[in-house]
Amino acid sequence: MYLDYWQLEKRPFENTTDPAFYYPSECHQGALLKLRYGVESRRGAVLLAGGSGLGKSLLVQVLRRQLPETIGPVVHLIFPQLCTQELLAYLAAELGAGDPNGQLPATETSLRRVRQRLTDNANEGKHALIVVDEAHLLEDHRTLETLRLLLNFETEHGFAATLLLVGQTKLLPALDRMPHFEERLGVKCLLRPFTIEETLSYVQHRLQTAGARREIIQPAALEIIHELSGGAPRRINRLCDLALLVGFAEERAHITPDHVAAVHGELVAVTPE
């Protein structure tokens, strides 16, 4: 709606996992390096944790693009709240070893199929990656225990797969209550919000990636954006997107501090407690 007005080629502040909009902050780049090390060195399990809206999903997409061809297949479990039987059946199917009749097999059958497929994959010189998104939702310890059992699948080459747990920080105490799982984590990464300098660079990076060729948001307004968003990328995106929309509607030449504050006030007013 506002692209032509601001002379942009695409919407700069969409909450998508488009790697083109990835901003390499110090924290995110450090986490990416550690994750690559954990996966490429074929560790059994790695962890990526951080508060809501800090860019965990986007970081996983960037990681996948950077992994060598020897890492695969990659199974992405987006909805982890499955019972043990369903979880193992899903993993088997995603690994190419699902039930040929489309039925829900017994837990033991799926477990055997997953193990055989991972073993065959390792013997072919490859290493599977199993990404468990929203892992903080795994409040049922039986599900976590099922995932831990995957770490027992080893071949002469080492672990048959790497388990990447991605979730909010409340996942950490859950793992602390399972020391036999926590001690198997080869790498642990914790994301933090942007600093004020990173917020300013992040917004400019997003605008330039979207095709901006002139100043759209004033420097002083960028400082207000950091203060109001707490440096969380998702909050920054929401605030900037609405600011561009309202700025277009009001035919503003630039986004100013007062404009950002007014837009934030509208967001707070309509956000339920």
Image (cartoon, grey):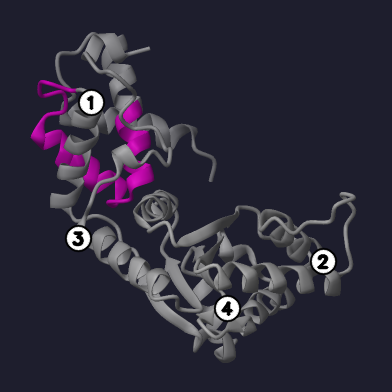
Q: CA distance from mark 4 to mark 2?
A: 22 Å
Amino acid at the residue labelled 1: His
Which label's residue is closer to the chain start, 4 or 1? 4
Looking at the rendering, the stretch of residues picked out in magenta corresponds to 212-241
Q: Residue at x 49, y 63 (%)?
A: 166
Please name which of the two marks, 3 or 1, marks the residue nearer to the observer. 3
Please name which of the two marks, 2 or 1, marks the residue nearer to the observer. 2
User: Is residue 34 depicted above or below 6 in this figure?
Assistant: below
User: Is residue 84 depicted above or below 266 in this figure?
Assistant: below
Q: Secondary structure at mark 4?
A: helix
Check if residue 229 falls in the magenta segment: yes
Q: CA distance from mark 2 to mark 3?
A: 40 Å
Q: CA distance from mark 3 to mark 1?
A: 30 Å
Contact? badges 3 and 1 (CB < 8 Å): no
Q: Residue at x 9, y 35 (%)?
A: 219
Residue 259, disc: 1
Residue, disc 2: 85
Q: Secondary structure at mark 2?
A: helix
Contact? badges 4 and 2 (CB < 8 Å): no
- Magenta segment, principal secondary structure? helix
Residue, disc 4: 174
